[in-house]
Structure formats: C-alpha cells, structure tokens
C-alpha cells in the first residue's frame, strides 16, 4: 500500500505523493493536536461506565490485525482502605480503573505500531491510520472523564489535594503521549535509514525521557494513593 488517494483523521488530509515517513509524521502530529487534554477531540464521546466509547477489546483487535479472538481485561489499580465515604471511594476506584485503561491503550498503541513497522517497505498505512484514530478517541474519552473526576474531587468532596494530584498527572500524561509519538516516528526513521546513527541516538534519548516520565507518573500515583486513604 504505497499510494493513497486521500487520508482523513480529524480535519486534515494528505496527498498521495507524500512519502510514508511524512504521512506517518503528519498522523502523529494530528494525534497530538487531537489530544489537547482540556478539549477532547470528540464532544460526543460518552464517558460513563456504560459508555459507547471505543472498547479496548476493539482496539486490541485493531492492533493485532483484527484478531477476533483477542480480548482485553482491566481491573482497578488498588482498593481504598479505611474510613473513606462510599461515594468518594467509588469515584477514586473509577479513577484507578481509567488509569488502568490508559496503560492498556498505550500497550495496544505500541503493539499496533510494531505491526505497522513489519509491513515495510510498503507500509500498511491505512490499517495504522485507523488504529491511531481509534486510539485517539479512547485517550480523549479517558481524559475527559479523568478531568470530570478532578472537578468532582475538588467541588463535591472538598479534596483539593487529590484534585491537584490529578492535575499534575494530566500534565505528565500529555508529555508521555508526545514522547510516545516522537518515539514511534524515530523508530520508523531508524528502520528506513539503518545507516544513520543519529536516528538510533534519538531513540535512546526519547526512551530515557519516557523512563523519567514514567517515574514521575508513578510518584504522583503513590501520592494520590497515600492521600486518598484514611486509616483507622
């Protein structure tokens, strides 16, 4: 699939004369633009437990080449302990579940990208474009609900400390997505230009930043866990 007449994800388009690497770069840019975390891409995305948001099982099928036997199972990070009001406990558990969904979505994103790279030199861009579109919707829905939880913690439960943790987390999650998109582009460039040492150096540098980002995310989650638990 070396030529495409048109491509649309969000509100941009491309012409068939673009190279695969350039098309991939534009797709990653669109993903980042769509993931303005305070303004999710699709206002119609529903974010309740019974929502119509793109299922992670469906994303798994996309990442694996639409293998209908593949499923995704998610469970909350932890369980709250102690004297936490039941409604607040439910909100906190939902937040942990959403973070688990985020991790699963990143895993599927990486899996789909690895499958895309294996289609070189005539990259199966249409397949990957669809995966990125679904991933974008999933991230947008997750982010929207996390922000709603942030507001509830502050306004409904008078827990500005927990709300502040989520605000910090959202900032780091935005950085993580940016780094992930940069890493995927760098991997394709390194594959297309194996003789270029700069490409390999760039991959190493981005991976280092991702490790640091994950450490910061873990620290924020630990702070949230500690502050959300009220012991006897």
Image (cartoon, grey):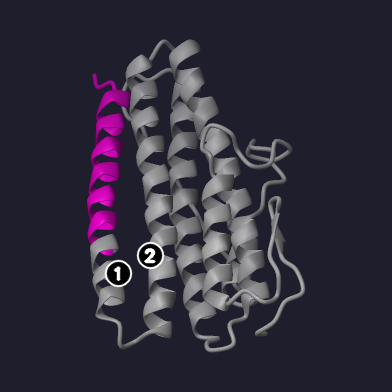
Query: In this picture, is 81 found above or below 174?
Result: above
Q: Magenta residues?
A: 207-232
Dot 2 or dot 1: first in sequence order is: 2
Asked whether the beta carbons under mark 2 and mark 1 sit within 8 Å of each other, the answer is yes
Using the numbered discs, state the Cα–Cα distance from disc 2 to disc 1 in whole angstroms.
Answer: 6 Å
Mark 1, residue position = 203
Figure check: 30 above or below 148:
below
Q: Is residue 83 left or right of residue 25?
A: left
Location of the C terminus by quadrant is: top left
Q: What residue would you read off at disc 2? A: 183
Crowdedness near tag 2: few (<14), some (14–19) or many (≥20) residues, C-alpha within 10 Å? some
- As drawn, the label of residue 65 is none
Residue 39 locus on image (x, y percent): 58, 34
Which picture quadrant has residue 209?
Answer: bottom left
Which secondary structure is most common in the magenta stretch?
helix
Picture mark count: 2
Could you classify mark 1 by the number of other residues whose Cα lies within 10 Å: few (under 14), some (14-19), or many (20 or more)?
some
Q: Position of residue 110 (x, y in %)?
A: 45, 67
Q: Picture coordinates of residue 98 (x, y %)?
A: 49, 42
Helix, strand or loop under label 1: helix
Task: Pick whichever, 120 or 110, lies toward us.
Answer: 120
The picture quadrant where one finds residue 222 is top left
Percent x, y for residue 225? Answer: 29, 33
> In which quadrant of the rendered image does the N terminus lie?
bottom right
Residue 162 magenta-drawn? no
What residue is shown at x 40% (from left), y 44% (from top)? Answer: 173
């Amino acid at each position: 699939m070396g030529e495409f007449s048109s491509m649309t994800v969000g509100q941009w388009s491309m012409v068939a004369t673009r190279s695969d690497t350039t098309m991939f770069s534009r797709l990653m840019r669109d993903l980042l633009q769509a993931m303005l975390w305070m303004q999710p891409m699709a206002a119609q995305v529903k974010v309740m437990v019974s929502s119509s948001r793109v299922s992670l099982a469906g994303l798994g099928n996309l990442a694996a080449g639409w293998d209908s036997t593949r499923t995704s199972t998610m469970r909350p990070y932890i369980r709250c302990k102690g004297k936490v009001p039941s409604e607040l406990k439910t909100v906190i558990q939902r937040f942990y579940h959403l973070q688990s969904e985020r991790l699963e979505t990143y895993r599927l994103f990486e899996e789909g990208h690895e499958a895309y790279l294996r289609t070189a030199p005539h990259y199966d861009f249409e397949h990957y474009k669809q995966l990125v579109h679904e991933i974008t919707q999933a991230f947008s829905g997750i982010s929207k609900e996390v922000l709603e939880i942030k507001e509830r913690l502050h306004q409904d439960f008078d827990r500005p400390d927990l709300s502040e943790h989520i605000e910090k987390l959202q900032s780091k999650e935005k950085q993580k997505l940016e780094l992930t998109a940069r890493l995927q582009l760098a991997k394709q460039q390194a594959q297309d230009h194996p003789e270029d040492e700069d490409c390999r150096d760039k991959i190493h540098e981005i991976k280092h930043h991702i490790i640091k980002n994950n450490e910061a995310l873990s620290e924020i989650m630990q702070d949230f866990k500690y502050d959300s638990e009220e012991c006897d």
